[in-house]
Amino acid sequence: MFYFVVRYARWLARVPGLPQFFDALLFLSTWIFKRSRVEAMEALENEALRLPNVRLKNHRFGGTEFVREPQGELGHIHGQGLLDVLLTREASQKLLATGRVRPHHVFPDSRWISFQIKSMDDIPFAIELLQMAIARA
């Protein structure tokens, strides 16, 4: 459902409050059907707060944003556990070549990459991605 909406109904993101509502529905669905994924998402948020000067805030398109001052957004996580991270072009191309991450769902030819959090086993790599985002500055 997420990819269908992003691909064919992207214009809905301009409707005030709708992206946040949609992401809340994604989170509710994840909480009902994939509770262990929600636990992993919460663990990622807790671990991210241990990184220097990182804080959390609501993302403008729903989900939770990881922010580090003065750098700004490092990445964000959507309600179904999709982590989007902004890296350098070189780092994103290297990671994409490994197949461990995929191109961003909206901006595939950018420095953004996407990584699906599925379980607690994914948290160390997700934190590594956020650390790479910190290092890009």
Image (cartoon, rainbow, N blue to C red):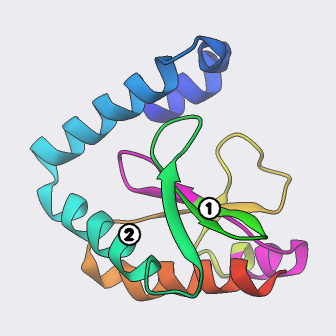
Q: Dot 2: within a 10 Å radius of its alpha carbon, few (fewer than 14), some, or many (20 or more) residues?
A: many
Work out whether 55 lies above or below 3.
below
Residue 103 location, quadrant:
bottom right
Please say if 106 is above or below 73.
above
Q: What residue sits 48% from the left and 17% below the top?
A: 18
The answer to whether 47 appears left or right of 51 in the picture is left
Residue drawn where x is 85% and y is 75% of the image: 88
User: On the image, which quarter does residue 113 sit in?
Assistant: bottom right
Q: Residue at x 38, y 69 (%)?
A: 45
Q: Nearer the viewer, residue 95 or 57?
A: 57
Is residue 137 in view? yes
Q: Quadrant of residue 111?
A: bottom right
Q: Is residue 84 magenta?
A: yes
Q: Secondary structure at mark 1?
A: strand
Q: Percent x, y for residue 70?
A: 78, 70
- Pointer 1 or 2: first along the chain: 2
Q: Is residue 14 left or right of residue 82?
A: right
Image quadrant containing the N terminus: top left
Q: Amino acid at mark 2?
A: Glu
In the rendering, at what x and y percent does residue 11 appear?
Answer: 67, 14
Q: Which mark is residue 87?
A: none
Residue drawn at (71%, 72%) of the image = 96
Tell me the distance, in whole angstroms, between the alpha carbons under discs 1 and 2.
11 Å
Q: Is residue 38 left or right of 10 when viewed as pictured? A: left
The residue pinned by badge 2 equals: 45
Specify start and end residues of the magenta stretch as a single range: 76-95
Query: Which disc, if any, is residue 75?
Result: 1
Residue 110 placed where, x, y %?
Answer: 85, 55
For the C terminus, which image quadrant? bottom right
